[in-house]
Amino acid sequence: MEEYRMAGIGSTLKTLVDAYERRIIEEALLRTGGNQRRAARALGVLPTTLHEKMKRLGLIRRPEAVASEPIALAG
């Protein structure tokens, strides 16, 4: 598929829409104290839809990788 870029902006429609969607979701999460269910309700989408959008947009933090070295127990 051929990509078209907006003149003078250098961004594709997908890039622009993703950036706008990310800002809207971040604002909804901020207004709801990070509560994803309330943010989804405010945005008029199902919580699962919001979660999938957050994953796609990189808004979900992944847990820290588990250290490869064993933890020494005191004792």
Image (tube, rainbow, N blue to C red):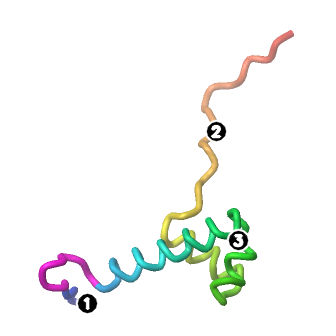
| Structural crowding at the residue carrying mark 1, measured as other residues with C-alpha within 10 Å and reported as few (<14), some (14–19) or many (≥20) | few
Amino acid type, label 1? Met
Earlier along the polypeptide chain: callout 3 or callout 1?
Answer: 1
- Coordinates of residue 66 in the picture (x, y in percent): 64, 39
Amino acid type, label 3? Gln
Mark 2 or mark 3, which is nearer to you? 3
> Vertical placement of 22 versus 33: above or below?
below
> Vertical placement of 38 versus 13: above or below?
above
> Vertical placement of 75 versus 61: above or below?
above
Question: Quadrant location of residue 49?
Answer: bottom right
For disc 3, the marked residue is: 36
Question: Quadrant location of residue 72?
Answer: top right
Earlier along the polypeptide chain: callout 2 or callout 3?
Answer: 3
- Magenta highlight: main SS: loop
Earlier along the polypeptide chain: callout 2 or callout 1?
Answer: 1
The residue positioned 69% from the left and 80% from the top of the image is: 48
Q: Nearer the viewer, residue 9 or 53?
A: 9
Q: Which label was assigned to residue 1?
A: 1
Highlighted range, magenta: 5-12
Q: Is residue 3 left or right of residue 28?
A: left
Amino acid type, label 2? Val
Most distant residue in the right direction? 75
The residue positioned 62% from the left and 65% from the top of the image is: 30
- Coordinates of residue 7 in the picture (x, y in percent): 13, 84
| Structural crowding at the residue carrying mark 3, measured as other residues with C-alpha within 10 Å and reported as few (<14), some (14–19) or many (≥20) | many
- Coordinates of residue 63 in the picture (x, y in percent): 64, 49
Marks 2 and 1 sit apart, C-alpha to C-alpha, by 39 Å
For disc 2, the marked residue is: 66
- Coordinates of residue 46 in the picture (x, y in percent): 70, 86
